Image (cartoon, rainbow, N blue to C red):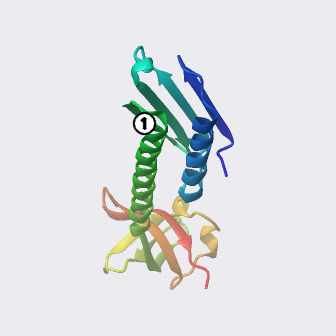
Amino acid sequence: MLPQDVHIKGRNVEILPEWEEKIREELAKLQKHSVEPILHARVEIIGTAHHHLGAFEIHLVANLPGHTLTVARQGEFVLPLIIEAFNALDKQIREFSRQKQQQVKAHEEFIHRGRIIRLFPEEEYGFIAAPDGTDVFFHANALKRGLFEHLAEGMTVEFGQEEGDQGPQATWVQVVES
């Protein structure tokens, strides 16, 4: 399956049918194996001033959600150049996906789980016992869902944590449904 928006053009050279076919084949392979969808792809083959002597350039631009990848290659023969450029783009997409997965994992590592140990309903705050034994302050404003009045001591919660002015505090709190 190809990206929805594909532009293939030649500059100083006419795009041959076999070149376009190879480009579409390579794009379909990339789209099939990419974790992120390729939203837009632009391929430009340029016949340089010496293209009659076998000097070509290929420029690839691929837009993924939140990111743009580019590849530029030069060579004598267009078909091998297309393959080389798409291999380089595939490598970039894999690296981008790997980095994105690491960011997600790093974010997940900051999700803590604990139990509410003290509540102060009039002041709308409380404390959570973190797994490491520290008491983590939280305010009613940190609740992701639900009302502060519905909280009870002993409830299990997930929370984000940061160091506040007076010790650890929850940046967000969410009750874990049992």
What residue type is disc 1 on? Val
Image quadrant for the C terminus? Answer: bottom right
Q: Nearer the viewer, residue 28 or 121?
A: 28
Q: Nearer the viewer, residue 53 or 132?
A: 53
Residue 115: % across, % down? 46, 81
Q: Which residue is mark 1?
A: 71
Q: Would residue 170 be found to the left or right of residue 3 on screen?
A: left
Residue at image position (51%, 35%) is: 61
Q: Quadrant of residue 177?
A: bottom right
Asked if residue 129 can be seen in this view, the reply is yes
Residue 118: % across, % down? 45, 78
In the image, residue 69 sits, relative to residue 49, either above or below, namely below
Residue at image position (52%, 61%) is: 142
Asked if residue 69 can be seen in this view, the reply is no
Residue 53: % across, % down? 40, 20
Q: Would residue 85 be found to the left or right of residue 62 on screen?
A: left
In the image, residue 83 sits, relative to residue 144, either above or below, namely above
- Residue furthest toward the front? 53
Q: Quadrant of residue 42?
A: top right
In the image, residue 3 sits, relative to residue 94, either above or below, namely above
At mark 1, the secondary structure is: strand
Q: Nearer the viewer, residue 1 or 102?
A: 1
For label 1, count other residues whose C-alpha is less than 10 Å away and answer few (under 14), some (14-19) or many (20+).
some
Residue at image position (53%, 82%) is: 155
Residue at image position (57%, 78%) is: 176
Residue 77: % across, % down? 43, 33
Count every numbered label the image shows and give the total. 1
